Amino acid sequence: MTPPSIYWDRQAARYYAISKWKWVNESYKNDGMSSTCGWRNLGGNDGFGTSFNKGLLLTGYSLTVMYSGGKSWTVANAADANASGVGYRFQDKATRTGCDGSGIGVAINSARGQQVISFKKSGKCKTVYGFAKFGHSWDETGINGVGVGPYSVSFQWTKNENSWVVASQPGATAKVC
């Protein structure tokens, strides 16, 4: 999990905050996978969000999720978006690979991801930083809500088991004027 990096694009006259995650192990293999081939849900929805310490004038945002095999997909709608940041929820899926006899493995549709949030200058200068948070579920647990506030990304769980959350450290500060 990387903390958000904030960049200024002079030509677009916009700031961009970019947060990323990457699974560093294959622990999802134990999240209820069967021995059958074909994509299936790993529990309920997962969540990802970025929150900032100051209110910002957002101009756009997106979340791109990448398969362990390299393909990517975009999450259509944010679960929460406001001046404090943006949060998403999405369905993670896994499949057995090697069903053609080439050897059994597991692939996941959310092995890596990148969230981009753009925002404008907003009058008075302020020192801005953010952090990112990922919530993962399996079995009968899922995320049915995501909230973003100053200094916070929250997940509302369908159950209090079969889940974990990881958060980045705060990112470097940027002076936004």
Image (cartoon, rainbow, N blue to C red):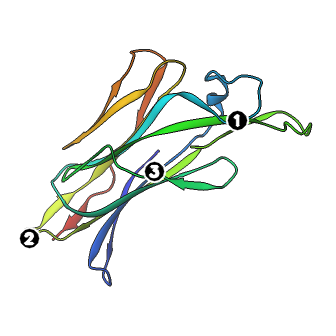
Q: CA distance from mark 1 to mark 3?
A: 19 Å
Whole-number angstrom distance, CA of label 3 to CA of label 2: 31 Å
Q: Which mark is residue 123?
A: 2
Q: Residue furthest bottom?
A: 11
Q: Is residue 98 left or right of residue 134?
A: right
Element at badge 1? strand
Please tell me whether mark 3 or mark 2 is closer to you in this view. 3
Mark closest to the chain's N terminus, 1 or 2: 1
The secondary element bearing badge 2 is classed as: loop
- Are the residues at dot 1 and dot 3 in contact (C-beta closer than 8 Å)? no
Disc 3 secondary structure class: loop
Q: As shown in the figure, which amino acid type bears the numbered disc 3?
A: Val
174 over 64 or under it: above or below: below
From where the camera sits, is residue 145 visible?
A: yes
Would you name the residue on which mark 3 appears?
A: 75
Residue closest to the far left: 124
Q: Earlier in the sequence, mark 3 or mark 2?
A: 3
In the image, 27 versus 39, the foreground residue is: 39
- Find disc 1 in the rendering and name its residue: 95
- Image x and y of residue 16, in percent: 33, 66
